[in-house]
Amino acid sequence: MNHSQRGISTIVTAGILLSSVALMGTGLVTWSQSNLTERQANLSTSFSNNINKLKESLVLEHIWFDPVPFVNMTLTNVGTNSINIVEIEFRDTNTLQTIQKHDISDGALDPSASYSFQPNFDYTLYQSFTIVITTERGSVFSNQATTP
Amino acid sequence: MRRRGLSTVVGAVFFVIAAATSITYITYSMDTIDNFAQTIAVNEVEQSNKENEKFEITRIKIDNGKFNFTLQNTGNIPVSIARLWVDNKTDSDWIPAKYTIDKSISPGGTKYNIGQDIPLFALDTQAYDVKLVTKRGNTLPVSINSDVSANLYANLIAMPDRVTDEFTTTLVLEIVNNMTSNDILTEISPTITCGSRLVPVTSITPSSIDTLEKGDIAIFRKVYKADGLAGDTSNCNAVLRTGGNTIGPVTVTIQDPAFASQSATALESEGLTCCKTGDDTIVFHDEAQGVPPISNSFQIYSGLPELNGVTKELDITTPIRYFTKNDTDVTVDIPSGSWDLTFVYNSNLTPSGISIPNMAYFFDDNFSVNDSSGNNLSLNPSSTPPVIIVGGDVHGHDSAQFDGANTYYSIPFSSEDNDIGSQPQTTAGWFKIDSSQAGRGTIYRVESSDGAEYYDISFDTLLDKLQFRYFTNGNGAIEVLCESASLSLDTWHFFVAVRDGDDTCSLYVNGGAATTKILGSDGTGSGAKNVDIDSQPTYLGYDPGTGNYLDGEIGYIMHWESQPITTEALADALYDANYGTGSHKLRVEYSITDQVGTELGGSENYIHEESDVLIPFGDPQNSPTGTQWHEFVYANTLSNSTDPSSEFHFGDNNRLKIEFEWNNDSSANSALLGMNLDVDDTGYSDNIGTKLQIPMPSTPFTSYFVWNINDDLTFTITNAGPEGMWPLFSGTRVIFEKVDSGEAYAGLLKSFNATSSSQNMDPEKDGTFLDVNKKGVLEFFKPKTKPETGLGYDIVPDAHYRMYVSIVGYDDRGSNVFRTFYVGVVNVCDTTC
């Protein structure tokens, strides 16, 4: 081997090494960026969902009973975020069994807005039941009521 | 070496990129977590605020058909009342309704008149469930006017239940709101009645209580005097509400005089007051000492009346003014809120220049006595009575509606009041003829037993004219007739019919000139000039001879026996007089003045002024409460718009001035009736009478009583009877309680009506005898923390004290006398006052 041959192979080897390092490095960086961006997005979504859920606040402002089978209730959004009520369920307070369940399609409430709901309900005198209200974000608000 | 260097550079570049990415992610994550934590913290604060939000209803009333809540924020964060839910529990058809309130209350603050501006007409006869909702979602449900018979503790006791003839016993009714629900009882107006052996001395006090919250106790008292023989008994009962359950009975037995029973003797203070009033209640007094040197000026302060009532006639020439005392040491701040001025008043029955009629009927649905003239001639309805139309007449007063078929009133004969036999006679009134009236509709008629002679005011629909006719039936007599011009049907008209001579008449209609006799003459012979009435009644709405009935309404009827109204001006004045909702028109002014009564001026010192305050007719003989006085509350919500805290500020030496001016109005059907104000009246049902209720001031306005500590400390009383009495040295005291700190001082009794020091009192020497209706002067030793005789004192001068005088004695029937006077807030000064 003369000096010139050894020099060429050294350069080639070096080039291969550098190319390999560059490729590996690029891949690694690309992977890490992609991974972190995805996690950041997940974190952002999770944060947003949980924070908004946390800010949801709903009260059963008034409930009154007309002669059977009519019950009237007014729910008010007392939080700072809008709420979308998607389900209202009546449960037996003792057995926790569902008495009736209603899907709500018009339950979007701005802050301070109220929603009136008048389902038919064959209640009996002095009957206690639990009203479970579920929002689109998954918050669950529970109130108890007793018929007159 | 060069390769290693290149690798190092490449590696470093990747390291920097990886490190930067990692740091960015970690920073973002930490920021996110921080945001999350802050959100949780804020949420916890909101939850905490919601839990700490506290407010109470301190008062509920139904005023003029509107709920009137007074709310107090009892927590330490602001409360915003967003909505009010109302459910009528009496009316089963009622649908719960939601009303927007949107009122904020600062911590510790009070908000008045909540509910007054919502479009709901509430009845105090009906029960309501109401719920107040805050913006944070908290609710306060209460029930109003629930069935008070349920689960309610009420007890009636007599103190004492054995009483000597001519002595008094006090019936005490206790009511405890012990209902398990959160019900608030409102407008509680119980009645206490006893058998005939007990004669009521006072009306029930208080006459009503606005609000009784859960756990609260209400106590009502009514004093009776025994009137019977030993062994007689009377049962007493109480009823909380008309138709409600009866409480009692409690039996009161009359017995022979017993030793040392409590005396019925009453003492009155002079220029001072008896019981304690709230600092926010300003009472109108008749005394004028210490007021500014302006005519017709009198005192006001927070001390109960001490006189038996003084009538102030409001006239157009001189306004009447009331001033609080100026005080160099006291500044008073009045927060924004409701100023309720309660007039206790009645109206003159006729305009100036017209005498009181012999009969006056206003057909008022509320009144038990029909004749407002004071002669008490009853108004007897037919078996099918006329219908009272509430607010039906031209001025908004009640009217009587006659059906044209079989309804009328008759008034029994009285030779002094409605014997229309001889001239002069005057009858006046408002009437409205229905278009369905057939033929002649009789308004007022008196006729002889055979129907031949008569005095008649009726409307002839064939002519559409009002006719005033009378016939004396003497030889050659011809019916005397005055008649109006043609009048429209279904319209209110006013007439004054006058028989002003033997065969003359005048008829004034709707304020116009008189129509005088059209035809007719009296006859000759005995009694020929008289309409000969023996004992025949007067009829309203009916002619018994022809069977004519009135189809229409009568607003009021007045009749003057043997008195003519002789001029058109007087007839016009009667036409203009308003007996309805606007009988009086007042200018009312509240202002801040200096010590001589000059208004300070400037918007910061402006309180309120209104020129046309309309006050309804207050029948001088009748009122819903059975007294001659009526109440009218002139209510305003006032605040100082130029002050940051909306308060009115009364600096040292400033006074509050209240000024009334009776505002005459010469336009047709307007106020022309005089008005009488009742002030300083201990006999009024709530023991206050005319008063002004203001928001609770920072410090009470001082009374007019000033004591210079260098002067003798004296107090004058009057014995109103029925027995004479001696004051006792033991127990008779003067007490001073410092307003700002509550420190108390008391002084022993030094003398009573003494003219020399040898007459001074001591534990072995009582005071001199004080006969009925006589005055006595109590002199006290100067107040000390440890009361004793002697010259020294330790009461601190130049300060303000609540002053009480407690008198113990015995009367000439051996009974004990106890009485405590609350003088009010007095200025105790030194050297100069």
Image (cartoon, coloured by chain):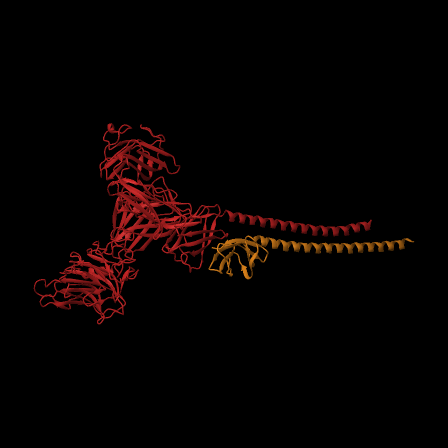
| Quarter of the image that includes the C terminus of chain B | top left
* Quadrant position of residue B168: top left
Left or right: residue B232 compared with residue B45: left
Instruction: Relative to B134, say whether B779 is above or below.
Output: above
Residue farthest toward the left in the current orientation of the protein: B525
Q: Nearer the viewer, residue A90 or A137?
A: A90
Viewer can see residue B370: yes
Viewer can see residue B566: no
Residue at x 46%, y 60% (from the top left corner): A67
- In x, y percent, where is residue B27? 66, 50
Q: Nearer the viewer, residue B624 or B691?
A: B624
* Quadrant position of residue B533: bottom left
Chain A color in figure: orange
Left or right: residue B654 compared with residue B230: right
Residue farthest toward the bottom in the current orientation of the protein: B462
- In x, y percent, where is residue B236? 31, 46
Q: Nearer the viewer, residue A118 or B552?
A: A118
Left or right: residue B786 compared with residue A142: left
Residue farthest toward the front in the current orientation of the protein: B231
Instruction: Relative to B199, say whether B555 is above or below.
Output: below
Chain B color in figure: red
Q: Nearer the viewer, residue B670 or B406?
A: B406
- In x, y percent, where is residue B764? 27, 27
Q: How many marks?
A: 0
Residue at x 44%, y 59% (from the top left corner): B95
- In x, y percent, where is residue B605? 36, 48
Left or right: residue A57 compared with residue B261: right
